[in-house]
Amino acid sequence: MLAAGCAAGETQQNTSGEIPEYVLAIHGGAGTLSREHMTEHQEKEYRSKLDEALSAGEDILRNGGSSLQAVRAAIMVMEDSPLFNAGKGAVFTNQKRVELDASVMDGRTLNAGAVAGVTDIKNPVLGAIAVMENSPHVMLAGDGASAFAREQGLEIVENSYFHTQRRLDAVIRQIEQDKNGTVGAVALDMGGNLAAGTSTGGMSNKKYGRIGDSPIIGAGTYANNQTCAVSATGHGEFFIRWVVSYDISALMEYQGLTLEQASGKVIGEKLVAAGATGGVVAVDRYGNVAMPFNTTGMYRGYVKSTGEKQIAIFGD
Ligand code: ASP
């Protein structure tokens, strides 16, 4: 049985010895999350939305769908919810607008796609998938990404669709705990394929035009069937410079570390030494899950074909 809760630097390992047929792990952002700042009602809301995201992805995996489809479904649930800093409910820039970043990676082919600084694609994760599948590029930004999304028939919305009073208050009053909520998902499907995706509004009060780690392959998102799938959340400038998601994969590939060791080292040691806050959710090809973070909390959860399931927020 896996521990319920995952404190800073700790990870979780599948100890059953059997490889689960499928696994899905998700996060809804890491940061200064504490029980004192959250009502019971709010906690319930978050838990139930995380559960809904897990169920949406699990339904796909249970029916033989791909890890990428599961990642897409789980992320879309969280993008559509005003609770998270992705899609509707994303944080504001210093110009009081919303600019969104997202990426996906397919661990079987190492194909990847991303959109950055987009202001009108309702579900940025769909933009990232479209770039991966239907363009010769890996990343499209700003107006070019929007034009491409239109061509692809994706739903386009006014920037005001993403706005919520809570995030406006957070940017005006600099409310610390309302800065969080990037979303991400990683999955292993029945075909043994890994995929990862991440979607965010970035950092509250960011300079307009700023791009974080979330749409950058190797920083915020990485997947490789030989090692693992990783989705990150945290202080993006550090996650880019420390190439966090790829570093976890590389430690497994070149140093033979387990997922637990590799992700624990990067989040619990290297980033801590750098003074960077955040966490990741990760799954390896054996279906082990790791969800380390070095903040007080991270919205997170996982489900496996074996019936193991966990949803947690705080560090206990
Ligand atoms: N990593 C995101 C960024 O820097 C923010 C977050 O995960 O909270 O854009």
Image (cartoon, rainbow, N blue to C red):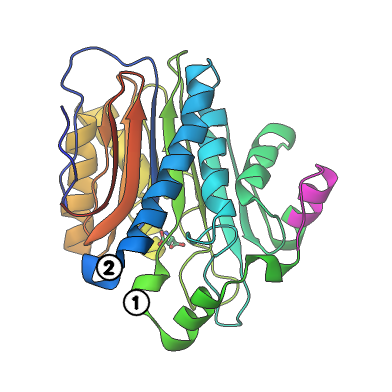
Looking at the image, can residue 106 be seen?
no
Q: What residue type is labelled 2?
A: Thr
User: Which is nearer the eye, 146 or 85?
Assistant: 85
User: Ligand 1 is found in which quarter of the picture?
Assistant: bottom left
Q: Is residue 291 on the magenta stretch?
A: no
Residue 176, disc: 1
Q: In this view, does 49 lie to the left or right of 130?
A: left
Rendering quarter of residue 247: top left
SS at mark 2 in the image: loop
Q: Residue at x 56, y 37 (%)?
A: 73
Q: Quadrant of the N terminus?
A: top left
Would residue 221 appear left or right of 313 to someone viewing this image? right
Label annotation for residue 200: none
Sooner in the amino-acid sequence: mark 2 or mark 1: 2
The quadrant holding residue 43 is bottom left
The answer for how far apart the CA atoms under marks 2 and 1 are is: 7 Å
Tell me if residue 129 can be seen: yes
Q: Is residue 201 above or below residue 207?
A: above
- Whether label 2 touches label 1, CB < 8 Å: yes
Confirm whether the magenta stretch covers residue 152. yes
Q: How crowded is mark 1: few (under 14 residues within 10 Å), some or many (20 or more)?
A: few
Measured as percent of width and height from the top left, residue 31 is found at 31, 64
Chain part drawn in magenta? 146-157
Say which mark, if any, is on residue 32.
2
